[in-house]
Image (spheres, rainbow, N blue to C red):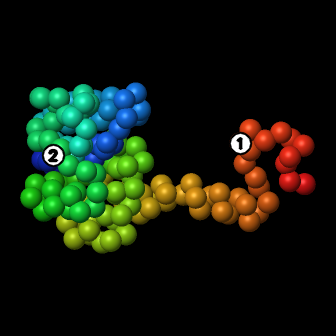
Amino acid sequence: MEKNLKKVLVLGSGALKIGQAGEFDYSGSQALKALREEGISSVLVNPNIATIQTSEGIADQVYFLPVTTYFVEEIIKKERPDGILLAFGGQTALNCGAELYTQGILDKYDHAVMTPEAAPVGHQRIHAQFEELAGNKGIYKWFGHASSEAPA
């Protein structure tokens, strides 16, 4: 980890249903603990109060706000983190990071993104594009269709 980092923003997974996406809560809480061990202050955005991430003593500062570009930008303005971690909030955090990037918000605040790099974040929303491309190339995905129903 870079030693010149003083404060990092971690985007949590947002509102979850019970039993959903526990791996993001676990990995995010471990990332927050690692930041603390490295002496780096952490700021967490996660509206879900029923997570380990949002437990007292895990993050230095917790914002119980939606993981959206509006709220994340407001937090960036206030907290001025040296970096943002997107990999611990699943698709919610990745989508938010991609929107922050495409709207130019990350550029506004300098070194705003830590792994993955800002440009590839936009490629995280590739699912629909892949399906469209695959369909155009004659590649089909199967969802419980019998092989006799498959296109020729």
Q: Quadrant of residue 110?
A: bottom left
Q: Which residue is mark 2?
A: 63
Q: Give the SS element for disc 1.
A: loop
Q: Relative to 135, is 42 on the left or the right?
A: left
Q: Position of residue 142 (x, y in %)?
A: 74, 44
CA–CA distance in space, label 2 to label 1: 39 Å
The answer to whether any part of residue 75 appears in the image is yes
Q: Position of residue 9 (x, y in %)?
A: 21, 48
Q: Residue at x 83, y 39 (%)?
A: 146
Residue 133 shows which numbered tag?
Answer: none
> Looking at the picture, which amino acid does disc 1 mark?
Phe
Q: Which residue is mark 1?
A: 143
The answer to whether any part of residue 85 appears in the image is no
Q: Residue at x 28, y 51 (%)?
A: 67
> Looking at the picture, which amino acid does disc 2 mark?
Tyr
Q: Residue at x 25, y 30 (%)?
A: 50
In the displayed structure, 114 sits above or below 110; it is: above
